[in-house]
Amino acid sequence: MLNYSNYIEKLRTSGLRPTKQRIKICEILFNTEKTFHFTINDLVKKISKATNNKISLATVYNTVHAFKKKGYLKEIPINSDQSYFDTNTSHHHHFYDENQKDLIDIDDADVEPVKINTRIPGKKIKSVEVLVKVEDINS
Amino acid sequence: MLNYSNYIEKLRTSGLRPTKQRIKICEILFNTEKTFHFTINDLVKKISKATNNKISLATVYNTVHAFKKKGYLKEIPINSDQSYFDTNTSHHHHFYDENQKDLIDIDDADVEPVKINTRIPGKKIKSVEVLVKVEDINS
DNA sequence: TTCTACATTATAATAGTTCTAAACTGTTGA
DNA sequence: TCAACAGTTTAGAACTATTATAATGTAGAA
Ligand SMILES: [Mn+2]
Ligand SMILES: [Mn+2]
Ligand SMILES: [Zn+2]
Ligand SMILES: [Zn+2]
């Protein structure tokens, strides 16, 4: 209830109309203790568990893209067939567990600043992200 | 001519039969001054420029996957709809130019060793790769 | 040369994502 | 208050990269 109005406000100030679909998706994505990673398919499952009112797949895609554009979600480049999204929009890095196909955050503080001793003329750096692929010790 | 037999040898010792399709793809991928990045679609175009004998799309996919499995190619995780491959299989990093959708190598020597002060129990590190997203200075 | 496992091929199938266009709804301002 | 309109949702079609299928072809062994 409390968060409900917060999300309405958040959406409005973002220039997004607070529809019931968007509010529900806000609740699922942002009303959590911890941030998490998800695929569109994961989100669709969470939605159907959380409500009886279905939200169409197109709307799920639309909403996720809108939230990404507003900076409320990040897309994580994992070499995979589907896009992975992240509710943690702070600057951080990832472990990718190749056995369990699982993304795990690495806090920015746990990575020594990455120094790159080369530049591209006419270009500015937008982000620097580290991906650490891991696997089971006996592999 | 010279490389031709080299590739036959390379394929044979890898347990891959040296078919004319695979040899042609070897020539395109590995008989170059510099390494490069490509999508399957890029490779298909290069093949049609290089020969009149068509190679089916399925074979291109099969061959790229086989070469990746043998360690002759790397797949680069860029957030995109298609897979990017790299003929540079040494340990290195990348700039990704978001305006030109272009991948550029960063030599491993140009990146200070990345120190990660956290581990996952039961997992070993397989790779540590840095992706630096860049864009035009006036963006 | 003959045999067989491996490889190629055209084509169908799959799956994630985007598009379309009609129906619906939040917001504005008369 | 409510008509009007721009923004949103929706089902389903379309799109596109990739993988599967199964028939045909071929390299290498015997
Ligand atoms: Mn892949
Ligand atoms: Mn994307
Ligand atoms: Zn994360
Ligand atoms: Zn590279």
Image: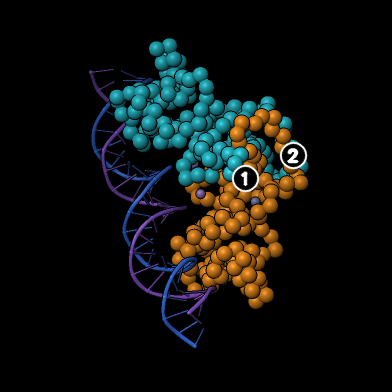
Chain colours: A orange, B cyan, C purple, D blue
Determine whether B135 is above or below C3 in the image. Answer: below
Label 1 chain ID: A
Q: Secondary structure at mark 2?
A: loop
What residue does disc 1 label?
Answer: A96
Marks 1 & 2, CB-CB < 8 Å contact: no
Residue type beneath disc 1: Tyr
- Coordinates of residue A130 in the picture (x, y in percent): 66, 41
Viewer-nearest residue: B21 or D30: B21
Q: Nearer the viewer, residue A118 or A97?
A: A118
Query: Relative to the observer, which residue lies in front, B48 or C30?
Result: C30
Question: Are discs 1 and 2 both within one chain?
Answer: yes
Using the image, determine if residue B128 lies above or below residue B4: below
Looking at the rendered image, the disc whose residue lies closer to the viewer, 1 or 2, is 2
Q: CA distance from mark 1 to mark 2?
A: 20 Å
The secondary element bearing badge 1 is classed as strand
Q: Position of residue B36 (x, y in %)?
A: 51, 28
